[in-house]
Every structure is written in structure tokens, then in C-alpha cells.
Amino acid sequence: MAFEFKKESVIFRSDNSQVSGLKIWIEGELTIYDALSLKETLDPILKDTNSILEIDLSRVSKLDTSCLQILLALKKEARKKEFTIRFVNHSHAVLKLIDLYGLTGFLRDKIKLQKEDLKEFSFQYGMGKD
């Protein structure tokens, strides 16, 4: 397994409410060689979570389409179950694929860019009104 995985129960606060949830950190490479292991790691969490799941992607050094598809399927399944999955702190490798495939609109995550990254990424696909 070329990635490491850490999870922690947390309380998410917003305005006047508090909701318990789970925060996950993924570190390392997420490639086709890790796809099955990633899916087997995330599936039980998806089954046991019913509120908020936040996945920190800041330490993902490499991401390919196979693992991106697993993350997208996770997000899609969460929508069906009516709970929230947020991808946060996207690494440069993650941002490159989100931009390449025009997934900003589908993901609906807050994406923070450094000033020097503004010229590299467009994030225009999926943001139109059509």
C-alpha cells in the first residue's frame, strides 16, 4: 500500500450547531495499484457514517484516474444517503485532476488556491448554467 490512512472522530461546528463526524487524512500515492486497498478502506467507513465525513487530501502526492473515480463514487453514494462528504486541503496532484476533468461543479468543495496557482488552474468546466 503506497498510502497511509488516519481517521479521527471530531465535532464540526457551524453557526449555532454542532455535529459529530469523522475526519480522514490520506497521505502518499493513490494509483491503480492502490485502488482496491483504497476502496476496501473507505467502504466500511461509508457504511458506518451518517453525518459528516471530511477527507483531507493535502498529503496526496500522486493521484490517478482510478482512485479519483473511487473518491467520486464515495461522494455520489453519500449524496444518495443524504449525508455530507467534503474533500478539503486538496494537494497539487488532486487539483490537477479536478481541473483536467472539470469536476469542480460536481464536487462542490471549497478549493483554496495559492496565488501562484491561480494561473495554472482554470476550474471553469462544470461551473456553467447549462
Image (cartoon, helix red, strand yellow):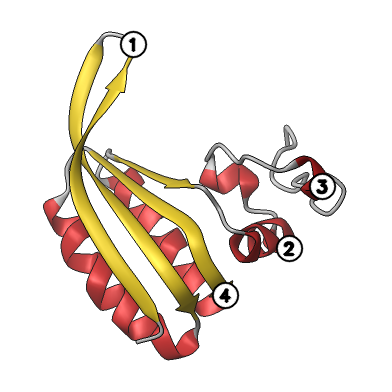
Q: Number of numbered discs present?
A: 4
Which numbered circle lies on residue 116? 3
Residue denoted by label 1: 15
Callout 4: helix, strand or loop?
strand
Q: Residues within 10 Å of mark 1 (few under 14, many from 20)?
A: few
For badge 2, the amino acid type reads Leu
Can residue 41 be seen? Answer: yes
For the residue pair 40 and 105, the one nearer the viewer reads as 40
Q: Quadrant of the N terminus?
A: bottom left
Q: CA distance from mark 1 to mark 2?
A: 35 Å
Tag 1 or tag 4, which sits nearer the N-term?
Answer: 1
Residue denoted by label 4: 62
> Of circles 3 and 1, which is in front?
3
Q: Quadrant of the C terminus?
A: top right
Residue furthest out toward the right:
119
Q: Are marks 1 and 2 in contact (CB under 8 Å)?
A: no
Tag 4 or tag 2, which sits nearer the N-term?
Answer: 4
Tag 3 or tag 2, which sits nearer the N-term?
Answer: 2
Tag 3 or tag 4, which sits nearer the N-term?
Answer: 4
Residue denoted by label 2: 100
Residue at 50 percent of width and 78 percent of height: 66
> Of circles 2 and 3, which is in front?
3
Residue 31 lies, in percent from the top left, at 50, 83
